[in-house]
Amino acid sequence: MTSQTSSNKIYRYKIILLGDPGVGKTSLIRRYVHNSFDTNYSSTIGVNISSKNVVLDNKQIQFSISDIGGNKRFASIRKSFYKDAKGCLLVCDLTRENTLEALTQWQKDIALAVTGVNYLLIANKCDLNDQRVISQTDLYNKSNELDILGHSCFITSAKTGNKVDEVFRILAKHIVSTNH
Ligand code: GTP
């Protein structure tokens, strides 16, 4: 979807973060949009939408970033927010194995509602290395199973900021190159 301002064209794209409760979706957005981190966990009720303006290849881009609460009780409202999504970060928590397994179902959920989505696999909380239970091989296998861009996985920390900007930038580049 695009719109025209008086002098510049602004490209507007929707990005969604999906994954089990507590994997760090809100925290990744907070790090990317506000460059901050909160250690308190407050489960997202329903959906929160943030926006971020970036310039890529001389194009003005406005991302609408949907933070969708991972709790199962939001399943019914969630689907209406998938519409028009161009990019999706599938997020797991490196300290909880089942959160990686769950991404198969999360992807099925969004793929039923919208096609043409660019996916990236994100393994968050890499600062908690001593509690890590998900291996590089596990991540590689999952990125092959899911339709992940370049079959790659990004290991992030919303706490330290490791790779967070890079993940959004790479997703943005893919979206821009596939949507003119
Ligand atoms: P829901 O809203 O329930 O779906 O959770 P969420 O995926 O949005 O998780 P949230 O961002 O709220 O983070 C859950 C907890 O994990 C919070 O206490 C965060 O401070 C913590 N957390 C998030 N990212 C990181 C990280 O990279 N490292 C560490 N150590 N903690 C993190």
Image (cartoon, helix red, strand yellow):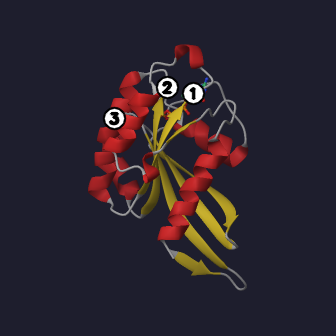
Label 3 crowd (10 A; few <14 / some 14-19 / many >=20): few
User: Can you tell me whether the CB of the residue at mark 1 lies under 8 Å from the nearest atom of ligand 1?
Assistant: yes
Q: CA distance from mark 3 to mark 1?
A: 22 Å
Position of 42 compared to 111: left or right?
A: right
- Work out whether mark 1 precedes mark 2 in sequence or the reverse, and give the earlier one: 2
Q: Which mark is residue 94?
A: 2
Residue type, label 2: Leu
Residue depth check, mark 3 versus mark 2: number of the one nearer the observer:
2
Q: Position of residue 159 (x, y in %)?
A: 66, 30
Q: Quadrant of ligand 1?
A: top right
Q: How many marks?
A: 3
The residue positioned farthest toward the top in the image shown: 130
Q: Which residue is mark 1?
A: 125
Disc 3 designates what residue?
72
Mark 3: secondary structure: helix
**Quadrant of the rendered structure where residue 117 is?**
bottom left
